[in-house]
Amino acid sequence: MTQVRGNAAPNAAAQGDRTNLGRLIGAGLILVGVVLLGLGAYLGPVRYATSTPGKLTVETCTVDYKYRSSSSSSSSRKKTKTRWCYGTFTSDDGKVKDLNAELRSDALYQRGHLIEARRTSDISYMQDHGWVHAIALGCAWWFGALIALAIGIFAAVTGFPYGQSESQGLFRTCLVTVAVGVLGLVVSLLVVFFS
């Protein structure tokens, strides 16, 4: 008679724990995807549609330099510059006027130059790049969310990366969805950059 030493049950329990961890990671990625969808809606078309259009008459423009390091050595510090323009904002309908408006600009402008701007809150302004820019910005966030949602759904259903893949069809669907998300993200970012 042969004797079997050890117990197969602990290995099965450990495999189940890892599958549950994969499903928990998938649920977290689904949550991240939902948050990205909300951010895309707010930072793209919603903020543009709810802001007040107008013009900023430039009084002065400045450049802020900030240094940040990517490692512990001081020789690898990167210099970033942000351009700010200050002046008077007047809405297109004439109802809103702010003498102390400031916004991040894409260039340094001379005194008296008019910049197309949008008032997003009582103290916040942004340069007006148009509807195409706003929609492309929202789409970039949405395609990023699509990537997180596809990977999250696959991990939540199968327990991947720790479990066994139960469905080749689901894997192919999620892979195509991630590819569409990456392609859409790249195209959206190109539109944002060039608009």
Image (spheres, grey):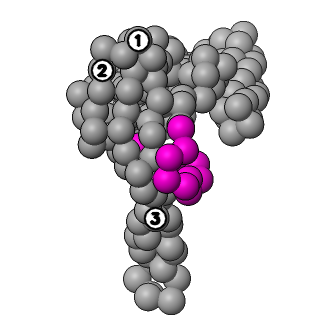
Q: Position of residue 170 (x, y in %)?
A: 66, 12
Mark 3: secondary structure: strand
Q: In this figure, which residue is indicated by the disc labeled 3?
A: 63
Mark 2 neighbour class, 10 Å CA radius: few under 14, some 14 to 19, many 20 or more: few
Q: Position of residue 85 (x, y in %)?
A: 43, 50
Report the residue that reaches farthest toward the front: 112
Which residues lie in the magenta part? 103-114
**Cα–Cα gap, marks 1 and 2:** 8 Å
Q: In this figure, which residue is indicated by the disc labeled 2?
A: 96
**Cα–Cα gap, marks 2 and 3:** 27 Å
Task: Please name the amino acid that badge 1 sits on.
Answer: Asp
The reply to whether residue 22 is in sight is no
Does the magenta stretch mainly form a helix, a strand or a loop? loop
Does the magenta-highlighted stretch encompass residue 105? Answer: yes
Does the magenta-highlighted stretch encompass residue 144? Answer: no
Task: Please name the amino acid that badge 3 sits on.
Answer: Val
Location of residue 42 (image quadrant): top left
Please name whichever residue, 187 or 119, is drawn nearer the observer in this view of the structure. 119
Looking at the image, residue 176 lies above or below residue 9: above
Name the N-terminal-most of marks 1 and 3.
3
Please name whichever residue, 173 or 89, is drawn nearer the observer in this view of the structure. 89
- State left or right for residue 81 relative to residue 5: right
Q: Could you tell me if the residues under marks 2 and 3 are in contact, i.e. CB atoms within 8 Å?
A: no
Q: In this figure, which residue is indicated by the disc labeled 1?
A: 93
Q: Position of residue 191 (x, y in %)?
A: 72, 30
Mark 3 neighbour class, 10 Å CA radius: few under 14, some 14 to 19, many 20 or more: some
Mark 1: secondary structure: loop
Mark 1 neighbour class, 10 Å CA radius: few under 14, some 14 to 19, many 20 or more: few
